[in-house]
Amino acid sequence: MFSERPGDLNDATRAAALAHLAEHEVDVFVIGGGVTGAGVALDAATRGLSVALCEARDLASGTSGFSSKLVHGGLRYLAHGDLPLAWESAVERAALMRRIAPHLVRPRAFLVPRFAGTGADETGARTAGSRTAGSRTAGSRTADALTETGIRLADVLRAASGLSAQVLPRPRRVDARGARLLAPTLREHGLRGGLVYWDGALEDDTRLVVALARTAARHGAHIITGCPVRHATATEAWLGSGERVRAKVVINAAGVWSGEFAPGLPLTPSRGTHLVFRSAVFGDPRTVLTVPVPGHFGRYVFVLPQSNGLCYLGLTDDPAPGADGYNPAVPEADIDFLLRTASAALDTPLTRSDVLSSFAGLRPLIGAGDDPAAASRRHLVRDEPGEPITITGGKLTVYRRMAEDAVDAAARRLGFGATHRAARSVTARVPLLGAPGSGDFGAFAWPAPDPGGAVSARLTARYGAERSRIAALATADPLLAAEVAPGSAVTGAEVVFAVRAEGARSPDDVLERRSRLALDPDLARTALPAVTALIERVRAAGFS
């Protein structure tokens, strides 16, 4: 039996939310269902405000679903000398890992290899076919020293943020053998060892956005997907179907589409491309492999192992004016750049035949100009009379702070003084659904044999405390314990849960975002009939 709970999102809750908006004014109306918009909805709802959010397509269907899945402590910002932004990232990472979403954000080891004679400064030369013999250049030694200094300073920020070394261990050096144990396909020639440091990584960025939206709904927010907003003012919005929404404050959190509701916003989309490989191509690495981009100190590409047997290689940072925010094209130049840069650190160069698929997301950068890689990742709150409050820029790691700043601006518009409940954010202490302390959903027991606990471990990693609800679905109907495609690891129970509780409305919502099966095109094609049939069955019978 499936028992609906507060925070579940489905067709029924969507219809109820639309009906509510047709008859009632809300305190805060949010445009956009990415990580920032969902964070705004949660922040406002937990302050006691009435809230509605409209997303044109699906939760995390834009930039928020196509990140590197990393929760940075600010190392990159230190490389650019931006200590305040690095500190903000470290603080927000600590909140996510300690209280908000420890079931989704986990420690991840990163390896920065060191090579003799072909250090960071010679990477491009080696890729072009030449090799410099002899001692390492002064430039390479300096780059290595600066990198280590930055990593150790980032660890100081980790400690100052209150995040224990038991959660994120301190950085350490490893020898060449240790480096190749962590990343087996590392180039052996010239390898002198490396530096290992730890940072935060998401199980899946879409799962974070869905958890934010559902937690907001649990606190009373009305969440509506598949509902584009065509026009908005400071206190009104018109939906794609023509309905007018009344609100005391409208907040524009539309990401790369923010300019549609904020004329003159100096927003520059930047494309971040990732290539997808089977983990075996990299020898099933046990760490994120960090490879410097030649000629760009502080910029790297990453080989990012995932729990589903895949690795992502990313990412680029190039201007992408006019690109499709939902499905940006991946240029041939991006593929060549990523393959060439990563191959410089590997024994066997990567080829296009190794690539399983690719994806890209557009960052909404403010005033990036011609070099997005050098642009600030600070966020912007724009509060102009007669316009919606706009929140844009920033990074996934600091979504909560972005949301807090946007709702602070809304509270000022609403005239709340400093002592009013709505003037103070509480989200740093609010666990998301599935996190420890978010609710007791009972003990977990998978109905079928589970050798080695693989199924329960996977569900715990993706659903946290809510894993028992999926097990209950499979217990009620054992057919739902089966995979939707051989080798997919995704069960029918997860598809039903996606539709009944997580707001999925189409096979694409399930394959592309709730399960990520679309990253393996052959597997997604095999799973499509079963996923489609399950969605139709849910709608016909309700599984209640």
Image (tube, rainbow, N blue to C red):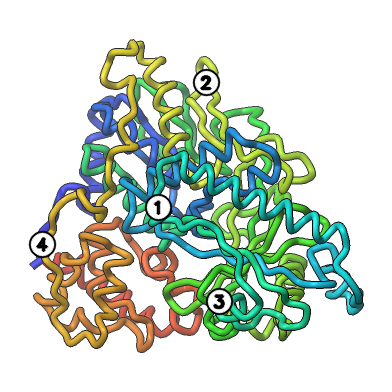
Give the image quarter of residue 313. bottom right
Q: Residue at x 36, y 58 (%)?
A: 104
Quarter of the rendering occupied by the C terminus: bottom left
Q: What's the amino acid at mark 2?
A: Asp
Q: What's the amino acid at mark 4?
A: Gly
Between the C-alphas of marks 1 and 3, the distance is: 35 Å
Q: Which mark is residue 442?
A: 4
Q: What's the amino acid at mark 3?
A: Leu
Q: Which residue is mark 2?
A: 383
Question: Callout 4: helix, strand or loop?
Answer: loop
Q: Which residue is mark 3?
A: 182
Badge 3 density bin: few <14, some 14–19, many ≥20, Cα 10 Å:
many
Question: Callout 3: helix, strand or loop?
Answer: helix
- Residue 8 location in percent, x, y? 21, 52
In the rendered structure, which disc, 2 or 4, sits on the residue that comes first in sequence?
2
- Foreground: disc 4 or disc 1: 4
